[in-house]
Amino acid sequence: MSSTVITGIGELITNDPDHELATGQLGLINNAAMIVDDEQIAWVGPAGRAPEADRRIDVQGRCVLPAFVDSHTHLVYAGDRSAEFAARMAGTPYDGGGIAVTVEATRSASDDELRSLLAQRIRELRAQGTGTVEIKSGYGLSVADEQRMLRIAAEFTAETTFLGGHVVPPEARGDRSAYVELVTGEMLAACAPYARWIDVFCEPHSPHAFTEDQSRRILQAGIAAGLLPRVHGNQLGPGPGVRLAVELGAASVDHCTYLTRADIDLLAGSDTVATLLPGVEFCTHSPYPDAGALIDAGVTIALATDCNPGTCNSSSMPLMIALAVRECGLTTEQAIRAATVGAAKSVRREDIGRVGVGCRPELIVLDAPSYLHLPYRVGVPVTHPIKIT
Ligand code: NIG
Ligand code: FE
């Protein structure tokens, strides 16, 4: 195994775990170096003290940070809903109904088509600084289609999520309980071998999604099958999503657009991360979540794209950071932590989202001297993955 020294790092963001997640500290080292091998970071410290290595990368005073962790995406799909986006910008509200359009297109696509669409999306997100990505099913909604979505997703990531409980598909609308039976029975059995997580769209404000009771049944069945729970909650209005996520010890509750004081207090007393998806607010004309209130209560926040064909067709973590700073009340430091170590916590991982000995060498360099440029240069592609091998 060969070693590489990365030198000339003007600013190194480490997210040192000694700092509290919510404080916005970045564990910053100026004028730093590090040694990495193919599998892990072996040494981090001041530039002058770096040990010898087989290879050298000089980043010439630029800023280096852990790659972003995109902890919420729906990247396996076919079809296009740009007209739905245009209609929404003209005032049509979002209610989840468009999901059926993507389900039809995805069911009609071959494995090879889905694989090559996904591969292209992964190339796109890597260029924008994402290292680890979570990928959900949820546009198959039949036993065979959900299973093949997860099989294909698993070729690209270990963070795969079974989302048979996304919406009730058109052919099952006459008997919603029968669909919940299918999701918790045959579909779960077929999908569990390819998934680490189980998720559900718990949303009383959508006629297509699931009630609190149905969501609980779906998540509990997943837990019994060995999957770890996460929840789509509180997206379209106040609701039971946060409560259910905390009750079941979910790693994360995602969206959190509409939170009550009680929701914030529940999150603060739990180990459940609040994942904010500000690209969705941008693309659905919804109010942005109040991240400041969560931070003040001591809740760990993650930032993710939710990249999907309906509510946010962007895989840009830098854009999410810029939106979190501009619209949700986070400082730049808090937003970067949420996009790295906060998102890592939301997928219960300690080996990513940080720069420390033993962590995976998922690193990015900015075409900039400081992390402050991430939201400052909004829309400009300043992130580049550091290729170790
Ligand atoms: O996270 N809210 C539910 N699911 C996705 C949207 C899916 C779609 O509209 O295709 C989300 O926003
Ligand atoms: Fe989502």
Image: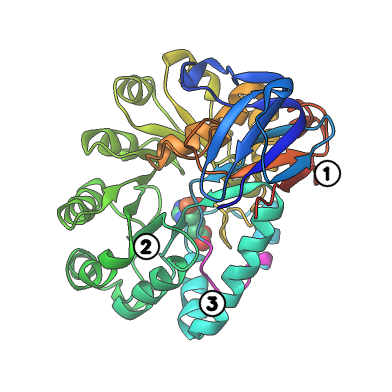
Contact between labelled residues 1 and 3, with CB atoms less than 8 Å apart: no
Q: What amino acid type is highlighted by mark number 3?
A: Leu
> Residues under labels 2 and 1: Cα distance?
36 Å
> Residues under labels 3 and 1: Cα distance?
29 Å
Residue range in magenta is 75-82
How many neighbours does mark 2 have within 10 angstroms: few (below 14), some (14-19), or many (20 or more)? many
Residue at image mark 3: 114
Residue at image mark 2: 167
* Lower sequence index among marks 2 and 3: 3
Q: Is mark 2 within 8 Å of ligand 1?
A: yes
**Residue at 60% from the left image edge and 27% from the top image edge:** 44
* Lower sequence index among marks 2 and 1: 2
How many neighbours does mark 3 have within 10 angstroms: few (below 14), some (14-19), or many (20 or more)? many
Q: So how many labels did they put on this image?
A: 3
Q: Is mark 1 within 8 Å of ligand 1?
A: no
Residue 80 falls within the magenta-colored stretch: yes
Q: Is residue 356 left or right of residue 50?
A: left
* Lower sequence index among marks 3 and 1: 3
Q: Is residue 265 left or right of residue 30?
A: left
> Residues under labels 2 and 3: Cα distance?
20 Å
Q: Secondary structure at mark 3?
A: helix
The percent position of residue 236, horizontal first and vertical second, equals 46, 44
Q: What amino acid type is highlighted by mark number 1?
A: Val
Q: Is residue 324 left or right of residue 246?
A: right
Question: Would residue 73 be visible to someone looking at this image?
Answer: yes
- Main SS of the magenta part reads loop
The percent position of residue 297, horizontal first and vertical second, equals 42, 15
Residue at image mark 1: 380
